[in-house]
């Protein structure tokens, strides 16, 4: 798998996948990806049983329901994986439904690894000159930080607390080292802002302690501001980046920008070794694109590849990535990558390549 051990409750031939397509372009990219994933699965001798769930801004506005407990338990216990499009709708300005559904699943399923690969799949997709090989992964802590929403507002003071527990920091740092070790990587870069935020000492101490257990891996540290610069200047030197929830969110969009943008950036929310995981593109619901038939479905397809790896079908994941590489080298690129192929045309082209 991509991060952690291979899991799956499927019988080996059919995987049951819950789908939360969500808002905006979410349903468009998910419905585009599904036939591609089906095709790749069939080619490798397994099948996917899709179960579409309605949770979205529309559903919330209609019913006041975000993610009911029974649905959460079903997602936790009864399916092999969760495949999510995007959540976010201008009609829900407080984003309550996304907090409950997306962040709620990450927190309640304890999916502490947000695994976000950044790989240059075609040389002309980067805005950089002479980039060389760009191929690193971000291990974003996914259950703590400012995302817990702790804090208070009183009068003119609005306080957002950032939670960093010893357990939380240790498990994400360890997951990054474990992945590096099992994937032949030799460098792990931890990023924090301990020069300005005293509590980030826990990240420094944890890095030093865990690094001693992995003598074959070079452990290094970058303040997140300096890392943002260096990622643009010299992205090819990075292999594994581990950081907190907020910095990981920001750096993963920066990473996407280095290799072609959000239209092709995949991510997985994992608890290594545990059963349930959630797979979603890095991008959001892109309301301005919704309904136009031009959303790029490649991020969703590659996210499906991460899901295949996790379910124990690495060859099917490789098939998807190979098809995407060929698509990106062809004239069938979607508009965000400089072409004029709409979502349906990209699906047709990808289907022909599998
Ligand atoms: P966004 O990712 O939706 O869009 C950012 C930019 O990237 C826009 O220019 C958009 O057109 C482009 N883009 C994104 N995905 C694309 C695709 N597949 N094909 C082509 N172009 C694509 O981010 P935003 O505008 O900051 O957020 C919009 C909404 O999405 C907000 O409500 C936000 O909270 C939500 N959001 C949700 C998720 C998620 O559910 N995982 C992730 C990010 C943002
Ligand atoms: C992401 C998104 C989410 C996040 C938002 C929608 C809450 O930006 O998955 O990257 O910040 O985690
Ligand atoms: Mn984000």
Image (cartoon, helix red, strand yellow):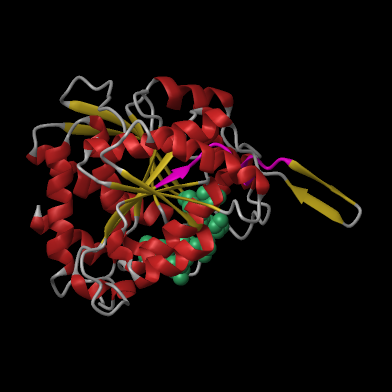
In the displayed structure, would residue 191 be above or below residue 111?
below
Lateral position of residue 103 relative to residue 257, left or right: right
Residue span colored magenta:
139-150
Query: Would you say residue 145 sits in the magenta stretch?
Result: yes
In the displayed structure, would residue 231 be above or below residue 222?
below
Q: Residue at x 57, y 25 (%)?
A: 69
Q: Quadrant of residue 139?
A: top left
Q: Residue at x 38, y 27 (%)?
A: 276
Of the pair 74 and 112, the residue shown nearer to us: 112
Lateral position of residue 325 relative to residue 281, left or right: left
Instruction: Please provide percent x and percent y for residue 200.
Output: 60, 45
Instruction: Please provide percent x and percent y for residue 179.
Output: 29, 37
Name the residue furthest right.
155
Q: Quadrant of residue 208?
A: top left
Of the pair 11 and 275, the residue shown nearer to us: 275
In the displayed structure, would residue 260 be above or below residue 176?
below
Instruction: Please provide percent x and percent y for residue 288.
Output: 49, 69
Q: Residue at x 16, y 65 (%)?
A: 327
In the displayed structure, would residue 345 be above or below residue 29?
below
Residue 39 visible within the image:
no
Query: Would you say residue 185 sits in the magenta stretch?
Result: no
Instruction: Please provide percent x and percent y for residue 49.
Output: 26, 32
Lateral position of residue 52 relative to residue 70, left or right: left
The image shows a total of numbered marks equal to: 0
Of the pair 69 and 204, the residue shown nearer to us: 204
Q: Which image quarter is the N terminus in? A: top left
Q: Residue at x 67, y 47 (%)?
A: 198
Residue 59 visible within the image:
yes
Lateral position of residue 293 relative to residue 202, left or right: left
Of the pair 196 and 82, the residue shown nearer to us: 196
């Amino acid at each position: 798998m991509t991060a952690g051990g291979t899991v799956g409750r499927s019988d080996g031939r059919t995987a049951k996948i819950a789908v939360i397509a969500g808002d905006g372009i979410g349903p468009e990219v998910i419905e585009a990806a599904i036939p591609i994933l089906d095709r790749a699965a069939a080619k490798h001798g397994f099948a996917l049983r899709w179960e579409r769930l309605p949770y979205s801004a529309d559903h919330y506005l209609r019913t006041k329901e975000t993610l009911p407990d029974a649905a959460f338990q079903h997602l936790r216990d009864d399916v092999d994986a969760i495949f999510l499009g995007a959540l976010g709708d201008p009609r829900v300005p407080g984003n309550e439904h996304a907090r409950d559904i997306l962040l709620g699943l990450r927190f309640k399923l304890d999916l502490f690894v947000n695994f976000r690969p950044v790989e240059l799949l075609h040389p002309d997709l980067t805005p950089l000159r002479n980039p060389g090989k760009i191929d690193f992964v971000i291990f974003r802590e996914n259950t703590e930080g400012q995302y817990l929403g702790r804090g208070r507002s009183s009068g003119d003071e609005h306080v957002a607390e950032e939670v960093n527990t010893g357990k939380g920091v240790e498990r994400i740092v360890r997951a990054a080292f474990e992945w590096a070790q099992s994937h032949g990587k030799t460098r792990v870069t931890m990023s924090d802002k301990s020069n300005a935020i005293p509590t980030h000492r826990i990240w420094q101490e944890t890095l030093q302690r865990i690094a001693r257990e992995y003598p074959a891996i070079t452990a290094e540290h970058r303040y997140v501001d300096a890392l943002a610069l260096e990622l643009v200047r010299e992205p090819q030197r990075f292999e594994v980046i581990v950081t907190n929830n907020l910095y990981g969110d920001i750096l993963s969009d920066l990473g996407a920008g280095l290799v072609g943008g959000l239209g092709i950036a995949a991510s997985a929310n994992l608890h290594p070794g545990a059963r349930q995981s959630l797979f979603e593109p890095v991008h959001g619901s892109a309301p301005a694109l919704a309904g136009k038939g031009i959303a790029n479905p490649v991020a969703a397809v590659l996210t499906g590849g991460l899901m295949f790896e996790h379910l124990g079908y690495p060859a099917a994941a490789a098939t998807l990535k190979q098809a995407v590489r060929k698509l990106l080298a062809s004239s069938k690129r979607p508009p965000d990558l400089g072409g004029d192929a709409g979502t349906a045309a990209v699906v047709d082209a990808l289907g022909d390549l599998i």
